[in-house]
Image (cartoon, helix red, strand yellow):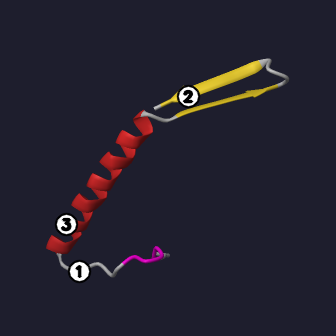
Amino acid sequence: MVRKLKGAKPAGNQADIVKQAQVMQQQMLEVQEQLKSKEVSSSVGGGAVSVKVNG
């Protein structure tokens, strides 16, 4: 069973698919760049376990 994504356009010819893949790749690179500067930290157990994650 194949489900369509919201807002997804129907697949066209091969050139359209390649173009869409290139756009998605560029978007992924932009998101990866943004993640490089992100930092998240959390602790549990009254501070017994602390975790700090960065890009």
Residue 43: percent from left, percent from top: 74, 27
Picture residue at 85% right of the left edge, 23% below the top: 46
Q: Name the dominant secondary structure of the magenta segment.
A: loop
**Counting residues from the N terminus, which is met first, the one under dot 1 or under dot 3?**
1
Number of dots carrying numbers: 3
Q: Which residue in the structure is indicated by mark 2?
A: 53
Residue at far top of view: 48
Viewer-nearest of labels 2 and 1?
2
Viewer-nearest of labels 1 and 3?
3
Relative placement, left or right, of 23 versus 50 is left
- On whether residue 22 falls in the magenta region, the answer is no
Residue 30: percent from left, percent from top: 33, 48
Residue 42: percent from left, percent from top: 69, 30
Tell me the number on the disc at residue 19. Answer: 3
- On whether residue 7 falls in the magenta region, the answer is yes
Viewer-nearest residue: 33 or 45: 33
Residue 11 picture quarter: bottom left
Q: Are marks 3 and 2 in contact (CB under 8 Å)?
A: no
Distance of label 3 from label 2 (alpha carbons): 34 Å
Tell me the number on the disc at residue 54. Answer: none
Viewer-nearest of labels 3 and 2?
2
Relative placement, left or right, of 55 versus 40 is left
**Counting residues from the N terminus, which is met first, the one under dot 3 or under dot 2?**
3
Tell me the number on the disc at residue 12. Answer: 1
Picture residue at 19% right of the left edge, 66% below the top: 19
Q: Amino acid at mark 2?
A: Val
Distance of label 2 from label 1 (alpha carbons): 40 Å
Picture residue at 56% right of the left edge, 28% below the top: 53
Crowding near pointer 3: few (<14 within 10 Å), some, many (20+)? few
> Which type of secondary structure does the marked residue at label 1 adopt?
loop
Q: Amino acid at mark 1?
A: Gly
Part of the protein shown in magenta: 4-8
